[in-house]
DNA sequence: TTAAGTATACTTGTATACAAGTATTATAGC
DNA sequence: GCTATAATACTTGTATACAAGTATACTTAA
């Protein structure tokens, strides 16, 4: 896998990833970004040629993306489903669902260590903002929520998170890259929201948690159209050659 | 894949499945049933030899089972995690979570067709009981809940269901097979509960839905230890030869 | 021109070959 | 007996080969 094209997914995050994973990460980004449009039919052979790898890792990647619901495997090939606004809202439905569930569990346990870990991650986010590093910010943002979700040790809630994470990560990456350029002022509010979230966890204040969670999501949702509009501009920069 | 050993998963359900899927279904059953014990390390080569297929479908199956959290892929091999009582409770946590979410959506839409479909499925369940067909009963039982979940057309809730379904199906299959033998009287209550559920959907009665859902789950949960006890007896019938 | 049938090119599914890395086991030295 | 080192056997990851099925396009006949 040594294409000359630019990668959408941060390569330094793939240091120990297999070829199959690399392909999955990159394909996922291109689908989410709309570079590969919905309805496109991907063939294993073509992808293998494009990425200059064999069909084995390609098959692996396609099965992964299929389980994430952004492509659908058919006998005739893999149909790209993409990520419309509807799906993004659905992702946040699920996040709201599981994070609310998690919070109910958190109320019953000691959250000192978790609060500390979250504070650390939040500091990292601030540094990322300071140095204008959208990717690092996204990484820490996701880490923040992941830490909360994993903290209750619920393997099936974690499983849901794991299935959701890659697509959400891709979306957040693209969204943050745009906002770092165009909506820098957003980040004050994001940081404040996360501080509120930590407070809610420390004080085990259910209402505060719901409030910060909803504001966090509303914040993102309101910006979805902006992202798609921004996507439109970048269309055609890279095109699926088939 | 033409082992002489008995299959745990109903073969007629696999008529159009690929070899990889067949292996996944069978392996999953053996892990859930405890025939392959937790901690066992599965090697692709051994499995390929056991099932008399190549490594390709085996790899596919292992990745599937890994995404279901019943094995963990490592460099040294696939570690069997199995399904303890904790995990089963967690599965029902998630079912409760998503079915409650689904019901909130159902309240807002027309449920006439759904109620009809559920009634049909329930009739099927009754027939299965009459003819002592545990597998068919399990199939319809799962179909019942799947119909409800899919009815709201929420792709990410459906995704969660799809990830949950195989393991749950396996567990329900084993559970029902035992109860058909030993706890035949249970099924009156199960049918009644499902009738209650349909009523709740028809009348959009939130409390009634929660009630039937909880009773349904409590019913199953109370029987978990019985299943495991029953499992113990069947241990050693087939052993992982390694 | 239209319809039917056949040939062809392309699809996935499975098997096999090869490479690189890791753990274990055996052997040599003390 | 014990430690260190080397050989060996086994692991996954990737590439390739082959088979079976499917859609498409072309050719032939009416």
Image (cartoon, coloured by chain):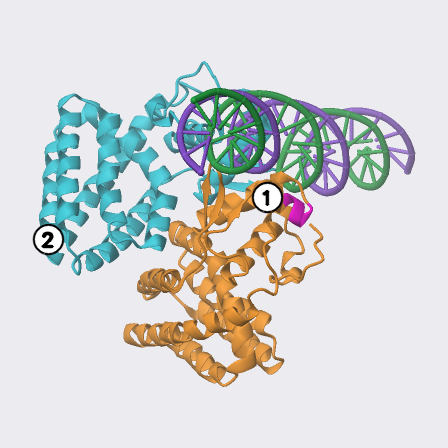
Chain colours: A cyan, B orange, C green, D purple
Eyeballing the image, is A74 above or below A188? below
In which quarter of the view is residue A174 placed?
A: top left
Bounds of the magenta span?
A: B48-52
Q: Looking at the magenta stretch, what is its main secondary structure?
A: helix
Depth check, mark 2 against mark 1: the one in front is 1
Residue at the farthest top position? A4
Mark 2 falls within which chain?
A
Q: What is the secondary structure assignment of the residue under circle 2?
A: helix
- Residue C10 lies left or right of residue B177; in this view the side is right
Query: Quadrant of residue D21 in the image?
Result: top right
- Residue found 21% across the figure and 44% down from its top: A217
**Residue that numbered label 2 is attached to:** A208
What is the crowding at mark 1: few (fewer than 14 residues within 10 Å), some, or many (at least 20)? many
Query: Label 2 to label 1, Cα distance in Å?
Result: 48 Å
Q: Which mark is residue B164?
A: none
**Mark 2: few/some/many CA within 10 Å (<14, 14-19, 20+):** some
Is residue B135 visible to us here? yes
Q: Are marks 2 and 1 in contact (CB under 8 Å)?
A: no
- Residue at image location 19% in from the left, 56% down from the top: A106
**Residue placed most toward the observer, D14 or B47:** B47
* Residue drawn at point x = 52 percent, y = 83 percent: B184
Q: Position of residue B72 (x, y in %)?
A: 44, 46
Left or right relative to A174: residue A60: right
**Residue A99: horizontal and vertical position, in percent?**
24, 52
Q: Position of residue B63 (x, y in %)?
A: 50, 43
Q: Is residue B49 magenta?
A: yes
Q: Is residue B181 above or below residue B8?
A: below
Mark 2 and mark 1 on one chain: no
Judging by the rendered image, the residue that carries numbered circle 1 is B58
Q: Residue at x 29, y 27 (%)?
A: A230
């Amino acid at each position: 896998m040594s294409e000359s094209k630019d990668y959408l997914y941060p390569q330094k995050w793939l240091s120990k990833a297999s070829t199959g994973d690399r392909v999955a990460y990159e394909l996922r980004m291109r689908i989410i970004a709309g570079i590969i449009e919905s309805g496109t039919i991907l063939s294993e052979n073509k992808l293998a040629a494009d990425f200059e790898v064999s069909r084995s890792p390609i098959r692996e990647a396609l099965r992964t993306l299929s389980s994430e619901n952004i492509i659908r495997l058919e006998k005739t090939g893999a149909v790209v489903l993409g990520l419309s606004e509807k799906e993004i809202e659905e992702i946040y439905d699920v996040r709201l669902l599981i994070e609310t569930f998690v919070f109910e569990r958190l109320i019953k346990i000691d959250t000192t260590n978790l609060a500390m870990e979250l504070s650390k991650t939040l500091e990292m986010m601030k540094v990322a903002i300071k140095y204008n590093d959208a990717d690092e910010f996204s990484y820490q943002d996701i880490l923040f929520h992941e830490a909360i979700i994993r903290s209750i040790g619920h393997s099936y809630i974690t499983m849901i998170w794991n299935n959701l994470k890659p697509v959400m990560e891709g979306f957040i990456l693209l969204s943050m890259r745009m906002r770092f350029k165009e909506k820098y002022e957003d980040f004050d509010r994001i940081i404040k929201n996360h501080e509120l979230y930590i407070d809610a966890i420390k004080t085990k204040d259910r209402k505060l948690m719901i409030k910060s969670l909803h504001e966090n999501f509303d914040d993102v949702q309101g910006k979805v159209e902006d992202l798609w509009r921004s996507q439109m501009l970048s269309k055609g920069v890279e095109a699926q050659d088939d």
